[in-house]
Image (tube, helix red, strand yellow):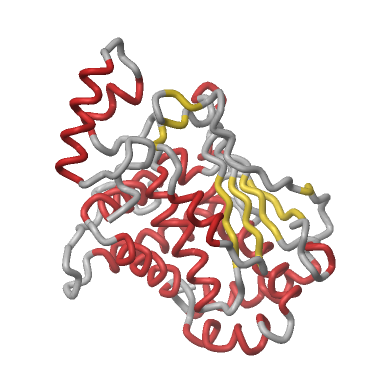
Amino acid sequence: MGSSSSSGLLIVLMILSANAFAPPREIFSHRRRRLGANVRSGTVEGPPIATKPDYSSIHGPLGPLMDSLLMSLFRAKLSERLNNPGNSILIEDSRLAADDFEGIVELTSKMNSRYNNRTEIHEIAREVLVSLFPPFILDRYPSWFARPFPVFSARMCAWATVVGGTWLMGECEVNDVPGMSIDGGRDQGVLVKRCRFLEESQCASICVNSCKIPTQMFFRQNMGLPLTMTPDYTTGECQFSFGKTPTEEEEEEAKSTPCLMRCPSGGSMKRWHHDEGIGDELWLADLATLIAEKGVASRTTCLLMDD
């Protein structure tokens, strides 16, 4: 995608995608995040570690070699953007191998913790996505596909997301999006069964500010296609709904999620997250310190979610 060969491959994939929806589809149900039994002390437990899949063995339709190339390309573009001399904050590349997933998690974690302005994070992440595509695709896609053929475009993007994004998200599949006005939303969604990026980062803010919001921005602004991403922090699932504009309620719900129990942010909160035999007085003191230092408005929201 950053070279002539990769851009040519992307174009071929998009053209072929119109006929690529033969596999069985799963109709998803739009769930609110289930924060009942799995919420403890203002945190979300998330899916059990015991059932965590071996993400290194999960590959997209084009196989492990292509996944490795896509991961290395994404890592290079992310590192290049974060270490741009014009940035207000410079973040050097990870020392991990280019095709090591942890290197991407390390960079996004640093970006999310060092930049106080969430809007700036959104824009940086969107620009990384833009840099993955040759300009002629982004210049023409809205007028050639998204506006005249919105349903076809939604299906094309859904299929391309599975093909090019399995390495990042883990196992996923094209599915239907109920409630869509045209063709019932058939094949216009992608269900991520247990998101690798969320699981490895273990941070709701990284999910929302480095993935959900900038990805939605990218498709709306650069591809001319609305997208709603609905993460479920209890199960680790995420539903992509191409052609659907996110509502203010949905966006606010994503931003107001409690902190994930295994979140590495706010070191002094770890004892509170895990309830390691400490009294309320101690974790409340830790929380008060964090509120004073970071201006956190509520103990039920992720420490890194707001500016």
Image side of residue 296 versus residue 192, left or right: left
**Which quarter of the rendering shows the C terminus?**
bottom left
Quarter residue 279 falls in = top left
Q: Is residue 179 above or below residue 267?
A: below
Q: Is residue 136 above or below residue 16?
A: below
Image side of residue 305 versus residue 26, left or right: left
- In depth, the one of 184 and 299 nearer the eye is 299
- Name the residue rendered at 24%, 25% in the picture: 284
Image x and y of residue 67, in percent: 53, 54
Image x and y of residue 142, in percent: 60, 84
- Name the residue rendered at 54%, 71% in the picture: 219
Image x and y of residue 176, in percent: 77, 56
Q: Is residue 243 in view?
A: yes
- In depth, the one of 269 and 189 nearer the eye is 269
Q: Is residue 97 in view?
A: no
Quarter residue 129 falls in = bottom left
Q: Residue furthest top?
A: 277
- Name the residue rendered at 20%, 37% in the picture: 290
- In depth, the one of 124 and 287 nearer the eye is 287
Image side of residue 296 versus residue 99, left or right: left
